[in-house]
Amino acid sequence: MCGFMAILVPNYITARVQGNGAQCKRNLTQIGQALENYAKEHEGHYPGSLAVLTKAQPRSYLETLPTCPAVGTVTYRDYQVTVEPDAFSFSCSGNNHASSTNFPRYNSREGIVDHP
């Protein structure tokens, strides 16, 4: 039985970590799509804050900001926006995944960026 558990537990942990990373990337994509929808309705300009996406004005783009499954809190805070050219980037802030600090990232030019 101990031999079976020695094989099973590391595989379970690996699968859970990979699942959390995949869900985090889906969250980043969902926020990125909401930012693009916002820009389509605001002359190509992105909002100054991710919080704007959850406020109805004339409508909300996200019900709430999603939480990172690895930590259970909102970690998508490292939002940066530029004007001329209009662009944005944000990340899962912290060291929550196996890659490196503040990764994965999402930006308006490349989409998901897994590692530096």
Image: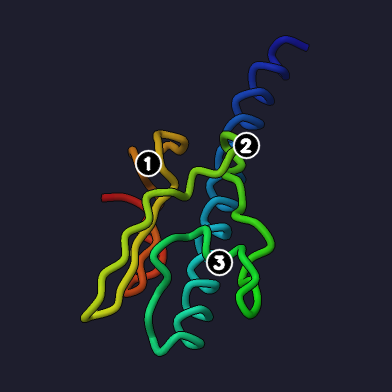
- Residue drawn at the location 26% of the way across and 50% of the way down: 116
Label 2 or label 1, whichever comes before in sequence order: 2
Question: Mark 2 or mark 1: which is in front?
Answer: 2
Contact check, label 2 and label 3, Cβ < 8 Å: no
**Whole-Å distance between the Cαs marked 2 and 3?**
20 Å
- Residue drawn at the location 65% of the way across and 17% of the way down: 6
Can you tell which mark lies on residue 53?
A: 3
Q: Is residue 81 placed above or below 67 in the rendered structure?
A: below
- Count neighbours of disc 2 (C-alpha within 10 A) and say few if under 14, some if 14 to 19, many if 20 or more: few
Q: Mark 1 points at which residue?
A: 99
Question: Mark 2 or mark 3: which is in front?
Answer: 3
Label 2 or label 3, whichever comes before in sequence order: 3
- Residue drawn at the location 78% of the way across and 12% of the way down: 1
- Residue 53 occupies quadrant: bottom right
Can you tell which mark lies on residue 72?
A: 2
Q: What residue type is labelled 3?
A: Leu
Dot 2: element: loop
Q: Which amino acid does label 2 sit on?
A: Gly
Q: In this view, does 92 lie to the left or right of 88?
A: right
Q: How far from the left and from the top, in percent, is residue 11?
A: 62, 31
Q: What residue type is labelled 1?
A: Ser
Contact check, label 3 and label 1, Cβ < 8 Å: no
Dot 1: element: loop
- Residue drawn at the location 62% of the way across and 39% of the way down: 15
Contact check, label 2 and label 1, Cβ < 8 Å: no
Front one among 28 and 37: 37
Label 3 or label 1, whichever comes before in sequence order: 3
Q: How far from the left and from the top, in percent, is residue 81?
A: 31, 66
- Residue 39 occupies quadrant: bottom left
